[in-house]
Image (spheres, helix red, strand yellow):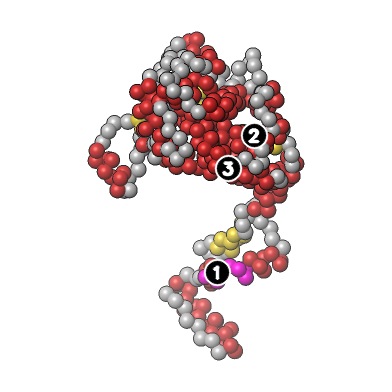
Amino acid sequence: MNTWQETATQVAAEIYGAFLEAVVKQGVMADREGPDDEKAYERIAKGTHIDGRVLRLMAISGKGGWSKNPERAKSYAMSTNVTLLDHLLSVVRGAVLLYALDKLGQNPDMDLALLRHRLRVIAAIAFLHDIDKALHLERNSSLPLPALEKAMVQYGLTEFLAPVTTLSAEQIRYLIELVEDTQRHRNPPAVLPPRDYEALMTYIALADKLDGIWLSAAPDQEHGVKGAINYLNKWQNLQTNLLREWRILDLYDPHHPFLLDELQRLLSWFSVDLTGIPPLLEVHHDGRLLMLLPVAHYETIVERALQKLCTDLPFGLDIVISNRGMPALYNGQPDYPTLQAFITDRPHAEFSQLFFIKANLKTTVTPELDRLLERLRVKTKLAD
């Protein structure tokens, strides 16, 4: 594994983690749909209750959705329905990771302070790129600056950007419009943001497009994981060829979703461990696991993940003793050495259950035990 890949992934994860803490945990989690209840807020603040109201950004569709308008309903049906929060976080994570890998792939000695600076800008604009949906605006409507400024403060984006830059709502709107080709340069600000910020918007546009293709089911266009790969191969702005080299993993096992959850976790872990790059796209839904893994070491990633999964099965040998004192082993058929090691490591208190008897048998069993233990000079004393 090349050091720059590991560094890019770590820095991207660092910025994304800071974003989740400052924006999602503090801002998004506080923005909920439902009636105001001062007493409930007091209990929530004390930690004795949780806020059961739905997050507002999860009550709005990011892709797909429903509409009473037949034409819109038909159009929405061409996309898998996800919440606006799901879509925004997917674009934030994708744009941050793609930029970090692409830039360090070109220049492994890039100043990491500059990289962190740009990743914060990317994360903030990526989160705001579909803010019109949260504001319930018609598509292609111009974003009102007061509402945009309020959203920046409400979701903690002004504070998130503060360590690296200060951007006005007018500059933020200008950058958001650069993400959409149909909106570019629609509202130029009085003072332009730093010139290098404009190039960052192409990575947000790429992540947005990939997420849309991933969720699309339109029959007249490429969609799904194959469509995402094809689009990456056509995109001219990527300089690091490694980001075009992905291979599809597609598994369907509706009877064992818990195994697919564990396998997904292991595949992601070994992908980063062996190549420095996490899966580009991954989802486990209704027993189907879909992932885009790096072509490099694909076979090894899958082999290591399966080996680890099988090693962990059957999730640990266990013994259960019934109320009749009958022992039963679960989760395996051990040989003698394995069983011996298992018994040695087990708390003695568990096996004491084998010697439990019914209270009404105490007077019958005690003399016989005394006879058997007499040579050891052990006196029987049965607990009540």
Mark 1, Cα crowd under 10 Å, few <14 / some 14-19 / many 20+, is few
Mark 2, Cα crowd under 10 Å, few <14 / some 14-19 / many 20+, is many
Q: What residue is rendered at 68% in x and 58% in y?
A: 333
Residue 347: within the magenta?
Answer: yes
Residue 329: within the magenta?
Answer: no
Q: Main secondary structure of the magenta part?
A: helix
What residue would you read off at disc 1? Answer: 347
Q: From mark 2 to mark 3, how far is it between C-alphas?
A: 14 Å
Q: Which secondary structure, mark 1?
A: loop
- The C terminus appears in which quarter of the rendering? bottom left
Q: Which x, y percent locates residue 271? A: 67, 43
- Residue 14 seen in the figure: yes
Task: State the image quarter where residue 289 is shown.
Answer: top right
Q: Amino acid at mark 1?
A: Pro
Q: What residue is rendered at 58% in x and 84% in y?
A: 372
User: In the image, is residue 265 above or below residue 54?
Assistant: below
> Which sits in the foreground, 232 or 202?
202
Is the C-beta separation of discs 1 and 3 under 8 Å? Answer: no
Foreground disc of the pair 2, 3: 3
Foreground disc of the pair 1, 3: 3
Q: Classify residue 254 as left or right of residue 298.
A: left
What residue would you read off at disc 2? Answer: 102
User: In the image, is residue 323 above or below residue 267?
Assistant: below
Mark 3, Cα crowd under 10 Å, few <14 / some 14-19 / many 20+, is some
The label shown at residue 210 is none
What residue would you read off at disc 3? Answer: 112
Q: Which x, y percent locates residue 122? A: 52, 32
Q: Which residues make up the magenta segment?
A: 343-349
Q: Which x, y percent locates residue 383? A: 44, 76
